[in-house]
Image: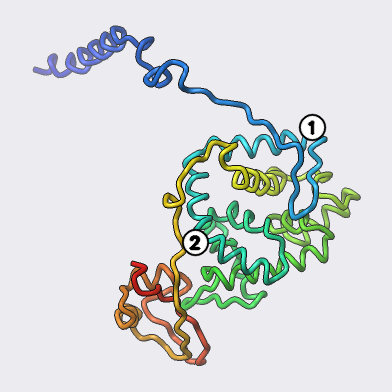
Amino acid sequence: MKISKLLLPLALGVLIILGFSAFDFKNFTAFNAHGEESYKVYALKLPSNLDFSGEAVPLDQPDIRERLDKELLVNTYWQSNMMLLLKRANKYFPTIELILEEEGVPDDFKYLAVIESALENVRSPKGAKGFWQIMPGTAKEYGLEVNSNVDERYHIEKSTRVACTYLKKAKERLGSWTLAAASYNRGMYGTDRLLSKQLSDNYYDLLLNSETSRYVFRILAVKEIMSNLRAYGFIFDTEDLYQPIPVRKIGLDTAIGNIAQFAKEQSINYKILKIHNPWLIHSHLNNRSRKYYEISVPETGSY
């Protein structure tokens, strides 16, 4: 009995090896399952010119071309991720674009939000949160409420306005929108210090760490792909995209003792109310200070 137990794994191993050796891999592979010539990976042709917020990218420089090429390849051939970004962009870009225009910030900065969070309310290991990945200290410095009750970094309109305020301040200090974008990753002070150390005033002339070196090029790659979808192989119908959901605002300056009950009174459920108001952290809203809040509620028939 013991010998049989010892021989069983060996016998199974022999059978597996024999099975593999007998299998005709030449005539059955991932490549020729749909025809031997059906699978191809193409090098990408770089655009002849490109800009960020009206500031030209020096594509005549070899290292600049290579850095752009890398990010275009990564984002083009990670097809599932890019398709999700395109779907979410259709849903959230209208809100972000409107605020950027109102705040006097170039439209290209909507792509910064894409690379920061993939347009999801995510939390980084360092504690940055929301579409714009704002740190707690920065949030409070720029007037967002962050506590155990409310976290307005998850409020798309308010966090976008804070990002705009930061970017305008960075542009004024550093001299260009490209450097302002880089500083969103490295910080205003860190970027300014690097410019002084390297006697430069241009992002593309700086020797940077890996993360900041890639940062602006990731934005450029997403912009280039989203602006030329068919050229990069992304095909879809309008109905395939995620759609903006119209909402109405309910203003209040009182506490909400039970958000589930409040949602029910609006003819929706707790889940839907929290989806549209992710800045509400708990199942209640404390409000001893009588602060004015606006709760987003989907229009009737949206769900």
Q: Secondary structure at mark 1?
A: helix
| Residue occupying image coordinates x 83% and y 65% | 173
**134 horizontally vs 176: left or right:** left
Q: CA distance from mark 2 to mark 1?
A: 37 Å
The picture places residue 243, in percent across and down from the top left corner, at: 45, 59
Look at the image and name its color scheme.
Answer: rainbow
Residue 215: give x, y in percent of width and height: 68, 48
Horizontal placement of 50 versus 258: left or right? right
- Residue type indicated by callout 2: Asn
Rendered residue at 72%/33% (across/down): 66
Question: In this image, 61 relative to 135: left or right?
Answer: right
Tell me the residue that label 2 is attached to. Answer: 121
- Residue placed most toward the observer, 44 or 172: 44
Q: Which mark is residue 62?
A: 1
CA neighbours of label 1 inside 10 A, class few (<14), some (14 to 19), many (20+): few
**Label 2: which secondary element:** loop
Q: Quadrant of residue 136?
A: bottom right
145 over 18 or under it: above or below: below
